[in-house]
Amino acid sequence: MAWRGPADESETGMIAAHADWSMAPGKRWMALAERRGAIWHAQAPRLVGDTAQLLPGLLADGRPVALGLDLPLGVPRDWAAGRAEVDFPQFLAGLVARPEFFRVAATLAEVSAAQPFYPARGIKGMTRASHAAALGLAGPAGLSRLCDRATALRPAGAPVFWTLGANQSGKAAIAAWRDWIAPALAAGAPVSFWPFAGPLHGLLAPGRVALAEVYPAEALRQLGLKLAGSKRMQTPRRALAPALRAAMERLRVEPSAALAAELENGFGADAAGEDRLDCVLGLLALVAVLDGARPDHIPDDPWIRRWEGWVLGQTDLPYGMSG
């Protein structure tokens, strides 16, 4: 798809940012870009810092803000079925009054709909099937949202409520929902959630933040990039620099001198280098949708639009899903 440009003049001064989230504050990095006319001016990744100041800082100038997050924004439909809330954002806002929801169960006996996160630590013989059964679900597939499931082009992601191992997102969900997003909603923060509130451009307004789920691994594929090795290693990250620069040129993203240096250096030799890469990948994927290089695709499924959510820019459907 050809570059579309701003939907209207109010978007020309907007901010796009992507935060790579973690339980550990030292692994929460954010990349930010400001659109001036047709060009995005991107800064080097920086630590998110005090989460209470994240939204006020992004909104300091009163401009529209699109913020991508590498964490689940939604819950599986089989778990949500029968809940009294209208949708996921309403459910999330109510969690500020239910801190017990975030207590990770140490045993299956502690798992319930009111305490779904599991396990607190590795236990011999534990399975996702037993986790699903403890939640009253028909099988382990019920733990996953459709956007978490495998497609023809990528493997499955981890279920929202699973908290163990390298391939899990439950801890990031807890850290963001409990410590930042739910309190911000309770305080009346000017936040809208994609896709629950509608297409992305319809959520962009001065003095408001549009939140969208963006996966760096999916972003890498959407951008047509491929790492020659593990993203945890500096050498493959450094080798990706020419392709990353080319992607930025295609998207009319102009890196600052500091960001250009980060690209050439493979985002550094420390353990947070992969996090800095991820937040830049997420930022570019967000810009691609904002400028029409990727479609703002939302499957026509009421559960996705009310409870499960979707990954921004993802057009590939899970196995067995059509439409």
Image (cartoon, grey):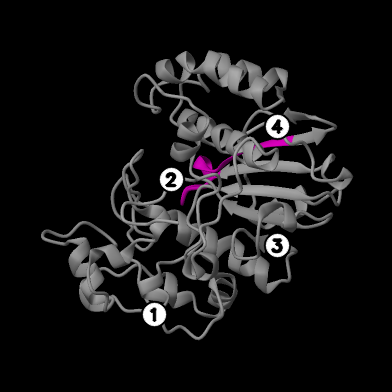
Q: Nearer the viewer, mark 3 or mark 2?
A: 2
Instruction: Say the numbered circle drawn on residue 114.
Output: 1
Numbered label attached to residue 316: 2
Which residue does the image show at 46% across and 61% down from the upper left?
174
Residue 21 counted in the magenta span: yes
Check disc 2 and give the amino acid type.
Asp
Q: Is residue 74 left or right of residue 122?
A: right
Circle number at residue 191: 3
The foreground one among 55 and 6 is 6
Q: Amino acid at mark 1?
A: Ala
Q: Position of residue 226 (x, y in %)?
A: 42, 24
Q: Secondary structure at mark 1?
A: loop
Image coordinates of residue 36 in percent, x first then y, are 84, 32
* Residue located at (67% from left, 39% from top): 292
Foreground label between 1 and 2: 2
Whole-angstrom CA distance, mark 3 to mark 1, is 25 Å
Residue 167 in sight from this viewpoint: yes
Work out whether residue 177 or residue 224 is closer to the camera in this orientation and state it: 224
Q: Residues within 10 Å of mark 2 (few under 14, many from 20)?
A: some
Q: Residue furthest front?
A: 323
Please state if 2 lies on the left or on the right of 195 as rendered.
right
Residue extent of the magenta highlight = 20-33
In space, the residues marked 4 and 2 are separated at their CA atoms by 21 Å
Residue 169 is left or right of residue 298, and the answer is: left
Give the mark toward the camera: 4 or 3: 4
| Residue 285 to residue 115: above or below | above
Q: Is tag 3's residue or tag 1's residue first in the polypeptide sequence?
A: 1
